[in-house]
Amino acid sequence: MSVLLADTKLQEVKEKVLHGERLSIEDGLVLYETPDLLGVAQLANIVNERKNGQNVYFIENLYINPTNVCEANCGFCGFKRKPGEEGAYTMDEEALLKYVEDRWNDNIREFHIVGGHNNEVGFEYYVNTVKTLKKHYPQVTIKAYTGAEIEFFSRLAGISMKEVIQTLMDAGLATLTGGGAEILTERYRAIMSPDKASTDQWLEAHETAHNLGLRTHSTMLYGSVETKEERLIHMQRVRDLQDRTNGFMVFIPLAMQPRNVKAGLNRRTSAYDDMRTIAVSRLMLDNFQHIKAYWINIGVQLTQMALTFGSSDIHGTLIEERISHSVGALTSAGITRKELIHMIKTAGKTPIERDTFYNEIKRY
């Protein structure tokens, strides 16, 4: 297979990729440091096409954030409110159902549910959120809560993470979201998310879910205080878990949204870093089927570019995303199916509408 490289330092990585060999953290650093971004893209595109051909996936989904009250103090968050603070809210059952009803269309296949770590309510509140939605919308897949939320619920209820997940599954939970991972090193977490689950606890939550039969999602929030090596350590840790369980469906690099003053960050990630990180993720995570380009954080045009940098998924319609927008995401809060299909087709790829588990619904 012809790959034209402008940097001879990429040659060894190229040989590994072409022969299907696993890349090391040292290889990952070469990919991050080389000036030959298009060479990295070529390699990532080869791996993606081996796994997914020309297919690019999307879903019709609705974001729901039942509460923004949170005990944690994360350095990147503009969503969280303290109890009683202006703008703080916790939806009761009536408000939850009204929120969905106002945004509902019959094509929605997934509810994506994350929120604050609100210790003003009990674990039963979070269980009832799932139960209520499943009762009223039995046909919709409930994708709810992060690994960090699972650890929080465990502390809140005084039960194991396994008991937490099983209780939620009994209420209608079908998969965990990928959030709460941020960067899976303790140096990073001590600085940016000291009150949330540790690296080991986040991984344990997902391993427990996998062992209970759930397939889940995995994210990486990049663009703040982490080093390139820490990003690669993060990838290696989820790759190691995937080796054990094969429970992750997709990896989602999330670009930091730093416009909120409280975040203490004043620069967005560059287009080069966004494209490179998607490509490096595709090359490092050989045991993941999909790498997602999250259009909310990097914009529609870069998401389209990402389809030749190793991405095979562009997420979904969202309807109304709040968390990234609370810290200054510049994109719209939702997008139409027609726009998603156009984005994929004009990149020369095949749009596939999917369900949560990557089963094909319709090919466009």
Image (cartoon, rainbow, N blue to C red):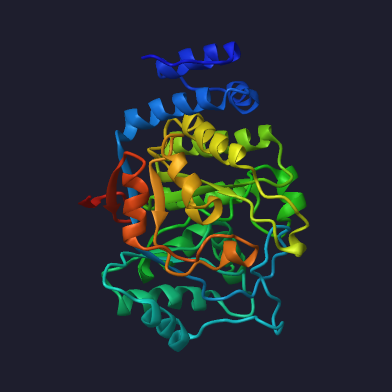
The percent coordinates of residue 64 (x first, y second) are 47, 71
Q: Nearer the viewer, residue 256 or 199?
A: 256
Residue reaching furthest to the bottom = 94
Q: How many marks?
A: 0
In this rendering, would 92 be left or right of 307?
right
The percent coordinates of residue 118 (x first, y second) are 62, 74
In this rendering, would 248 be left or right of 326?
left
Q: Nearer the viewer, residue 216 or 322?
A: 322
The percent coordinates of residue 363 (x first, y second) are 21, 49
Q: Residue at x 55, y 54 (%)?
A: 297
Q: Residue at x 66, y 50 (%)?
A: 198
Q: Residue at x 35, y 46 (%)?
A: 344
Q: From this view, report whether residue 145 is shown above or below residue 19.
A: below
The percent coordinates of residue 175 (x first, y second) are 40, 57
Q: Nearer the viewer, residue 328 or 290?
A: 328
Q: Quadrant of residue 152?
A: bottom right
Q: From this view, report whether residue 61 is shown above or below residue 355.
A: below
Look at the image and tell me whether residue 45 can be seen.
yes
Look at the image and tell me whether residue 211 can be seen.
no
Q: Residue at x 64, y 56 (%)?
A: 257
Q: Quadrant of residue 270?
A: top right
Q: From this view, report whether residue 313 is shown above or below residue 278.
A: below
Q: From this view, report whether residue 35 is shown above or below residue 133.
A: above
Quick one: quadrant of the N terminus? top left
Q: Quadrant of residue 46?
A: top left
